[in-house]
Image: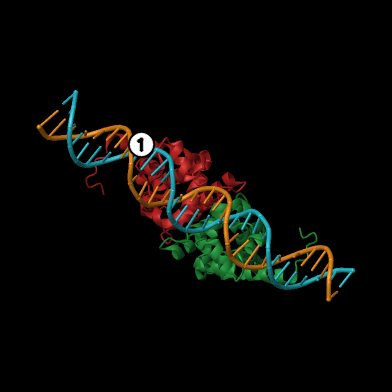
Chain colours: A red, B green, C cyan, D orange
Amino acid sequence: MTPAKPLRADAQRKRQALLDKAREMFDAGSFFDLRFDDFACLAGVGVGTLYRHFPTREELAEAVFREEVAALCDCARQLGSTLPAVEALASFLRGFVDYLDAHRGLARTLATLMASRAGTLAEGSQALERAVLDLVDAAVQEGALRRDVDGGAVMMALHGIGAAHDRPQWRVEADGLITVVLDGLRSS
Amino acid sequence: MTPAKPLRADAQRKRQALLDKAREMFDAGSFFDLRFDDFACLAGVGVGTLYRHFPTREELAEAVFREEVAALCDCARQLGSTLPAVEALASFLRGFVDYLDAHRGLARTLATLMASRAGTLAEGSQALERAVLDLVDAAVQEGALRRDVDGGAVMMALHGIGAAHDRPQWRVEADGLITVVLDGLRSS
DNA sequence: TTGACAAGTGGAGACGATCTCCATATTTTC
DNA sequence: GAAAATATGGAGATCGTCTCCACTTGTCAA
């Protein structure tokens, strides 16, 4: 994965500047609205440099996306090793909603990203997927959840919550969906 | 809404040609991959004509989208007046999955459309939303479903099913989510 | 230090898609 | 059937994306 490519000192810095600015736009939800050239300028970098580090907008997006996902995964693992399985799952799902609620722009960006490049993102999001699946599986093992439905359904619900980010009643409906899904998973 | 604008006879025809070709691309899932100029050509129309009828790609998309939605609404109403409320809801949701499954390209197009122009589509999708909400409300009135969660949560689940269109296990997971949501709605 | 080579930079301009504009063609009206 | 109103199409302006390379900066051996 990282065979042997010691990046030169200044290159390292530019790359980070790009990444930082990208994350900023990500959170602001303006990532896809910005001209790519302007973006380079904003990060204090020439267009050429931008394109060398990140050949496409999607590649840049994915780099940021990975970091975002890593944080969520840590959270999931932490919960998994602290609470009983069902509670861990519930906490994680509630936390996910809280997180998106506190970062509306990010929700918007993610929705766009998913729609246009769902395939490309598969690798990056696999870690998150595994974390969620593990939580669900653990709860199933404990006998607390039905066996006939797997974590994929939960992933889909999360997709929906992200995708529907601009519904007026988003928060209420998202909470409702989580409640319904959790109860649905518990029913025989 | 339609104050007074009797379109000239030939204009009517061109407009329809555009709409027909657009629907074709919609179903094929290539709507957003096609150059807009080429699209005009494909429909046997000049670029200028295309732009006069539909100033933006999104406006054209919405016109097609409306038709698509109308069909789904009819289906929902029909079920609502034929079956007991809960069964009507279940049938509709299952039917929705069947429909997307049979029109994968359309699912892809819709997901893209929703992500980029969710706001713009609100008006067009309101009819569908009302239909779903009516089904849910009717079931709640009958006392068959819990009162503390409204149809918005169901809409979100549908969003998720559409948005996650390219998951390998899509069909299974979508069915699972519907099952979970229905059971969750039934639990006290 | 310093010279020489590798690694990285930035932005001018090529490219390609979107969209405008208007001379021309078609329909409608009287 | 001719004048007025309406619609057409496509050449070319516009604007964002991306490439290319003359130049700058960092690295390292002597």
Residue B116 in view here: yes
Front-most of residues B137 and C17 = C17
> Does A131 appear above or below D25?
below
Front-most of residues A177 and D15 = D15
Residue at 61% across / 70% down in the picture? B20
Q: Is B35 on the left-hand or right-hand side of B169?
A: right
Which part of the image, by quadrant, shows the N terminus of chain B? bottom right
Q: Position of residue B86 (x, y in %)?
A: 61, 63
Residue A188 in view here: no
Q: What element carries label 1?
A: helix
Front-most of residues A149 and D13 = D13
- The crowding category of the residue bearing disc 1, from other C-alpha atoms within 10 Å (few below 14, some 14 to 19, many at least 20), is some
> Does A67 appear above or below B76?
above
Identified by mark 1, the residue type is: Lys
Q: Where is residue A33 in the image (x, y as percent from the top left)?
A: 52, 45
Q: Quadrant of residue B8?
A: bottom right
Q: Where is residue A22 in the image (x, y as percent from the top left)?
A: 44, 40
- Callout 1: chain: A
Q: Position of residue B80 (x, y in %)?
A: 66, 66
Residue at 55% across / 51% down in the picture? A164
Residue designated by label 1:
A14
Marks counted in the figure total 1
Q: Is A8 on the left-hand or right-hand side of B96?
A: left
